[in-house]
Structures are given as C-alpha cells and as structure tokens.
C-alpha cells in the first residue's frame, strides 16, 4: 500500500520556549467494484445481473497516524469509513467512520486503543486464518462474520506480542445505566507461530440489553508451504440474542433478519472451514474455500416454530495483479441449505434452497 504522509508540526509555547512533536498522518483506502450474476435473488427465485461492491475487500477510505512521544512511546489513531463503490453510499447510514474510530498508545507494553474497533476474534480470522480474509460477498462471509461479530463500538482493546505468541483482548461497554453487563462484550484471541505453522483461537461473549448471551469459540490453523498455503478452522456458537441469524443471513438474499432470530431462544451452531491458496505465478493467485455449518434450535418468529438445519458454501477465486496496488479478479460460489437453514438462506416461497453467483471485478489499493 502506498502511503501519502503529511508532516505536521504541533508547537506549544511555554515559559521556557517552544516544544515540538512530529506526527505522521496517512490517507489510505480500497476501491473495489464487481459485476455479478446471481441465480436466485428474490422470493420468486429469479436470477439477477448487477454491479456490486467488491467480492473480497469492502471499499473504504481512512486516515491513520502516529506521534512519537519519546522514550519508545507513541500516540496513534485510525478513522475509517466503509462505502459501496457502485453507488458511493456509506455502508452504514448516519455513521461516518463506521469501520474504525479509535485513538491509543503504543510502547514496549504493546498497544492500548479505545473507540470503535474490530473484535480480536475477527482480526485473528481476517488477518491470519480465513482463506478469503472473511469474504465480502454475503454468500461466503456468513460463518466467520457470525462468530466474530466483526466490530464493536465503545471498546477498550489491548494487543501484545510475546515472542512467537500474539495476544489480544477487548472489552466493550454496554453503557446501560444500572447494569455493567447489559450490552457489553468481551473478546479475546491468541496465536502461536512456529515457522510455516500457525495455530490460534479465541473466545467471545456478547450480551444484549436483556442480558441474553452470545458466546463463540474458535480454533484455527494454517501451514505455509511456500507457493501453497493451507487453512482450517472450527467454530462453536451458542446464541440467545437472536443476532447470529442476522449475521448468517445474506443481506439481499434472505428473510433471516426478519424471521430467523428470536431473543431468549438459544440457537447452537457448529461450523468449520477449509481452504487453500496457490501462487501460480508472481501475478496470479488461486484460492479455494469451503464453509459448513450445522445449526440447532433455529427460531422462526414469523413461522412460530424451531428447527435444525445445515448450510454450506464452496468458493473459488482467481486474482491477477496488474501491479502492487491494482488487481483483476473473478470469483464463483455455490451455496446450499437444508431444513431449517433454508429459511435463513432464501425465501422458501421460491421453492429453491441453493444459489450460484459469479463475479468479476477490479480492486485498487491506495
């Protein structure tokens, strides 16, 4: 990523003279746009051909910087906005910096940050173990997104490296008067790296305002052979908040947000993923991934019942680098649901419980 840095001088007058501090500020971002075919995109089961935000990386623009405070101590900040490159609209209405908004300190002790941030569990998957870095298309990001909850506001987070071990822990304030537990979240991640092999895992618990709990456990591993890298991971999710169904749902291809979640009923999900990436040439990378989930006690508020189901997705992705900052890509995924998971995956009125999508796009990183 090419960094455009601005050198700012902050001067404060004191009785003894002027004091100076140096701050480096970077403007960065990704613009990723694709053209996509979907075989089943509404309640009638009709196909669609449309332009979408990117397949792998959400479009974004951000600002980040550090200030050297001396003695090995630095101040730092990050502000990041997500947007849809096909329309220019913000990805979250009325929230400018919906992806990141934090300030913190870094030193020999590690990093401490406060504000809106990714959860440690999400960063563990996106940066190290998920073969698609938690894919952007809703059809292939549902399992790791549901487990990690992606990002949370009002968070205090610590990150530290201890030789081959990296650790992260966070606590998000619920900010509900009279109850420190309501609306709060605890997240943690631990990773060990030994040469080409890495293993990691995490635990996360999120409470809603009624103190219903969502807990997630993860264990993942990877091995880098050089040109080829293998990935794998396991999830266990127990959710009584009703939010897992929303994350499991495709935003534009599901009724799960309305009918798949019921607070107070504990849903259980057991899932795993497998994947590999292959560096075919210096410019061409091929990636494949498989995601599977078995869900129990899935509540349908609209149907008034509870059931079990299964769901999986198979994804293939080829990326060709025109430069370090610009890539062309194509991706294809096949998705299938059974039993109760059908009501998450698609509107059952169409009689279809599978979906195939094909996308082609361009990504530019600056």
Image: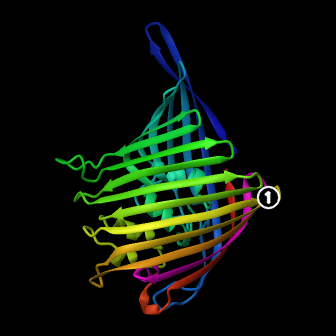
For the view shown, which residue lies furthest in the right direction? Answer: 281
Which residue sits at x=43%, y=56%? Answer: 217
Q: Which residues are magenta?
A: 322-345
Q: Residue at horizontal 53%, vertical 75%?
A: 312
- Of residues 22 and 263, the one nearer the viewer is 263
Q: Residue 229: horizontal and vertical position, in percent?
A: 70, 56
Q: Is residue 120 magenta?
A: no
Instruction: Write the residue at 41% across / 51% down.
Output: 203
Q: Nearer the viewer, residue 29 or 276?
A: 276
Q: Is residue 323 magenta?
A: yes
Q: Position of residue 285 (x, y in %)?
A: 75, 61
Instruction: Answer with the quarter of the image where residue 55 lies.
Output: bottom right
Q: How many marks?
A: 1
Residue at the location (49% across, 50% down)? 201
Locate residue 197 relative to residue 343 in the image: left or right: right
Residue extending farthest top = 16
Q: What is the image's colouring?
A: rainbow
Q: With 138 as the anchor, is 3 left or right in this view?
A: right
Q: Is residue 231 visible?
A: yes
The spot of residue 218 in percent (x, y) is 47, 56
* Quarter occupied by residue 5: top right
Residue ID for mark 1 = 322
Image coords of residue 101 (percent x, y): 45, 46
Query: Residue 230 versus residue 9: which sits nearer the camera?
Result: 230
Q: Nearer the viewer, residue 272 or 168?
A: 272
Helix, strand or loop at label 1? It is: loop
Residue 279's place in the image compared with 271, above or below, is above
């Amino acid at each position: 990523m090419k960094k455009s840095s601005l050198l700012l001088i902050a001067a404060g007058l004191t009785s003894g003279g002027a004091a100076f501090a140096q701050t480096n500020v970077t403007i960065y971002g990704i613009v990723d746009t694709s053209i996509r075919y979907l075989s089943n995109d509404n309640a009638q089961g009709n196909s669609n051909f449309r332009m979408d935000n990117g397949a792998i990386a959400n479009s974004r623009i951000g600002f980040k910087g550090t200030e050297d405070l001396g003695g090995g101590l630095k101040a730092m900040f990050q502000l990041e906005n997500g947007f849809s490159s096909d329309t220019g609209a913000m990805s979250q209405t009325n929230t400018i910096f919906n992806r990141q908004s934090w300030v913190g300190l870094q030193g020999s002790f590690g990093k401490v940050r406060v504000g809106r941030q990714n959860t440690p569990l999400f960063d563990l998957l996106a940066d190290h173990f998920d073969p698609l870095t938690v894919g952007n298309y809703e059809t292939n990001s549902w399992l790791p997104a549901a487990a990690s909850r992606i990002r949370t506001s009002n968070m205090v987070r610590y990150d530290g490296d201890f030789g081959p071990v990296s650790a992260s822990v966070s606590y998000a304030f619920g900010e509900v008067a009279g109850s420190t537990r309501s609306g709060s979240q605890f997240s943690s991640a631990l990773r060990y790296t030994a040469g080409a092999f890495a293993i990691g895992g995490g635990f996360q618990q999120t409470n809603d305002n009624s103190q219903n709990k969502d807990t997630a456990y993860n264990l993942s591993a990877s091995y880098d052979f050089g040109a080829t890298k293998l990935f794998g991971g396991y999830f266990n999710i127990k959710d009584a908040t009703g939010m897992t169904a929303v994350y499991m749902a495709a935003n534009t291809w599901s009724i799960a947000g309305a009918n798949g979640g019921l607070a107070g009923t504990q849903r259980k999900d057991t899932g795993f993923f497998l994947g590999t990436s292959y560096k075919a040439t210096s410019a061409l990378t091929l990636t494949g991934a498989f995601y599977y989930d078995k869900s129990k006690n899935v509540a349908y508020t609209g149907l008034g019942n509870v059931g079990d189901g299964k769901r999986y997705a198979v994804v293939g992705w080829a990326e060709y680098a025109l430069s370090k900052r610009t890539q062309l890509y194509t991706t294809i995924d096949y998705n299938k649901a059974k039993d109760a998971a059908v009501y998450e995956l698609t509107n059952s009125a169409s009689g279809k419980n599978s979906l195939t999508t094909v996308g082609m796009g361009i990504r530019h990183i600056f």
